[in-house]
Amino acid sequence: MRLFGKGPAAPQVHKTMPMDQIMRLAGEVEDIAQSGRVQAEALDDLSADLGVPREKLYASLGSSPHLELETEHPVQFVVCSGGCQQRGALVALQTLLDAREDRMEEGQPAFDVIPRQCLTRCQQGAVAEVRTPDGTAVLTAITAKSITDAIKEVLG
Ligand code: FES
């Protein structure tokens, strides 16, 4: 699998979540976890209940190393939702979650969105990995457009 977007890091111009909000939402996510696992559908419901955008709940999940998203698909987009927030990680998460929802509603192949606190390529942020049965590709300096292109390339 080829690598996407190996250019320099995106500028640090994006607003990040305050730490107290991350902690509060991580507590909410922990409350809906079962044996340390959280379902995407439960996160959607929690987003609607709290009136909080899904990407913020995913970022809070990513900050909780003892919690895991329950995967449902053979393809996963793993997104740094920690320090990469200042380089657009929340926009990337929102793009992925919207595309995932659209694909599932249309019966197209979809994917899981897994947040992580850091993917150890901080100078190339925002960073994501695409994990498929054929291997893993690293996406750097991601944008809404490059994420959308990657989804199409991987899943058609
Ligand atoms: S902070 Fe995003 S890769 Fe480290």
Image (cartoon, rainbow, N blue to C red):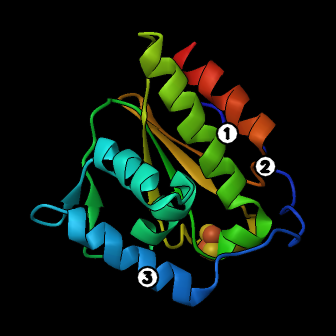
Is residue 64 among the parts visible in the rendering?
Answer: no
Alpha carbon distance from label 1 to label 2:
7 Å
Callout 1 amino acid: Leu
Q: Which residue is mark 1?
A: 3
Alpha carbon distance from label 2 to label 3:
35 Å
- Dot 3: what SS? helix
Q: Which residue is mark 3?
A: 24
Q: Percent x, y for residue 51?
A: 52, 57
Decide: few, some or many residues near mark 2? Use Cα within 10 Å; few <14, some 14-19, many ≥20. Answer: few
Asked whether the residues under the numbered discs 1 and 2 touch, taking CB atoms below 8 Å apart as contact, a structural biologist would say yes
Callout 3 amino acid: Arg
Q: Residue at x 24, y 48 (%)?
A: 70
Is residue 21 among the parts visible in the rendering?
Answer: yes
Callout 2 amino acid: Lys
- Dot 1: what SS? loop
Q: Residue at x 25, y 75 (%)?
A: 66
Q: Looking at the image, which residue sits at the far bottom?
A: 20
Is residue 1 or residue 85 the one in the foreground? 85
Q: Is residue 108 left or right of residue 90?
A: left
Decide: few, some or many residues near mark 3? Use Cα within 10 Å; few <14, some 14-19, many ≥20. Answer: few
